Image: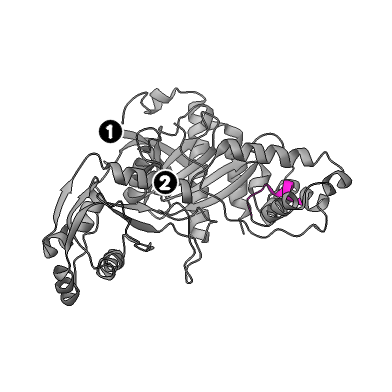
Amino acid sequence: MISDRLYEYAFAYKKTKLWKVLFDSDLFALRLSDGSIGYVSIMGKLGEYCALALYIGEEGIDTFFTAAEADEFQMSPLDYQEHLMSQNCLQCAFDKKDELAREEQEEVKQYARDHGIRLSGRNAYPMFFQYLPNHIPWQLQTDEEQKMLCEALEAAIEMARLLEKNTPKELGFIEEGRPNEIPFLEKKGNTYVLGKTALPEKKPKQWPSPEITNDIMAANLKKNPRKGVWECKIVRFPEAVKEPEEDIPVFPVILLAIDTQTEYLLPVSPVCYYEEQPQKLLDLFLDTLQQQKICPKELKVQEERTYAFAENLCKKLGISLTMEEQLPFLEEVEYDFFNHFGGNNEEEIETVMGFLYEMLNMTKDQIRQFPPEILSQIESLIGQEVLPLELERELRQLLPGEKPKKTGDRIISFSKNLDK
């Protein structure tokens, strides 16, 4: 449950409209009460997504840099999506009420009623998220997270107050390029002191490089016929899965490996938590090779993560490993893979949503005249957590045999990204 204190700061921050002054790249820092440094990004300047994000420490801000590097036009769809998934931060966002679960809507409404706040206009409802790398955005887990987000919102309110009498440049924000220093707020008693602090450099990524630990497996693979030049890449699966012992759904990785001569795609299973347990993916790759009675002649990769993954196994098995800028077979497979599992036909979605909203103006008798297969398809969308809550509720009342139901917690899809 969200505390009244967090709601108080969220609504107070919303009044400042700080996103009309600062871009998401205009970072400032604050010292949190536990002594760590928090880095704040204000989103909403372009009107796409209104939020405040708090990145904690160098580990957190490093993920901001990774997400900021996401380039929809220069990257493959899977790489672009993975960059956006990389964030490690806490967020206070504002959106329409349909984006909240019913219980969350009621909680916000109750706070607003108790404090004389009118919920109207665009982005009227505050939401609070925890972003972990390669996970679905999730609700805040601890009181400490709420406390840190309160501190970030309070600092943002102070920054908005300072900007009433000063330009961003006068406070230490630069107009272009990456700053060496950024504004730094530190609370002394009840007063903030404004200074500057160094903005950490982005750290080079250290990718895991697992080794073959099963000598018998290695010996058996060496006996297999040397077949083909294989283009390989580790990619992030575009759909999240929920592990039995974990609360938050995670995006697994999968190794795409295609034989350039036969165009055969090796059936390697996806794994979760690759960065922590890279050996699992290596073992699955080796098992699949052995099942297929294959030992590749050469592996071609185009990025450092897959090179690090394959380096030790290639040395052990005597396989040639090369880095290439273009891997045409793999790029086609990657594109097809994304379209199959993560593609999003926006025009088709808009058409379907337009039709569903038109249905709200029809009578029940008119709807009963629809072909059964159409009604069946519409009914299949209800309860799948893909429709706005209000639309789903009204459709339940209109469709034959459908009755209004309570809607439980919803998983918030990872569709929000940084303002550009």
Q: Is residue 416 above or below residue 110?
A: above
Residue positioned 17% across, 77% down in the render: 216
Which of 20 and 189 lies nearest the eye of the viewer? 20
Residue 321 vs residue 192: left or right? left
The three-letter amino acid code for the residue at tag 1 is Asn
Chain-order first, disc 2 or disc 1 = 1
Image quadrant of residue 222? bottom left
Instruction: Give how far across and how far down residue 279 sits, in percent.
Output: 27, 67
Q: Which residue lies furthest to the bottom in this view?
A: 216
Q: How far apart are marks 2 and 1 (CA)?
A: 41 Å
Q: Which mark is residue 250?
A: none
Residue underneath mark 1 = 180
Residue positioned 89% across, 46% down in the render: 365
Residue 209 within the magenta-colored segment of the rendering: no
Instruction: Give how far across and how far down residue 123 sits, in percent.
Output: 63, 38
Q: In this view, does 23 lie above or below 219?
A: above
Residue 387 within the magenta-colored segment of the rendering: yes
Which of 60 and 326 lies nearest the eye of the viewer? 326
Residue positioned 37% across, 64% down in the render: 269
* Rendered-image quadrant of the N terminus: bottom right
Which of 334 and 141 lies nearest the eye of the viewer? 334
Instruction: Give how far across and how far down residue 244 sits, in percent.
Output: 49, 71
| Tag nearer the camera, 2 or 1 | 2
Q: Would you call the spot at circle 1 few (<14 residues within 10 Å), some (14-19), or many (20 or more)?
A: few
Read off the magenta span: 385-393
Q: What element carries label 2?
A: helix
* Rendered-image quadrant of the C terminus: top left
The three-letter amino acid code for the residue at tag 2 is Asp
Residue 420 vs residue 399: left or right? left
Q: What element carries label 1?
A: loop
Instruction: Give how far across and how far down residue 412 sits, in percent.
Output: 57, 51
Q: Which mark is residue 336?
A: 2
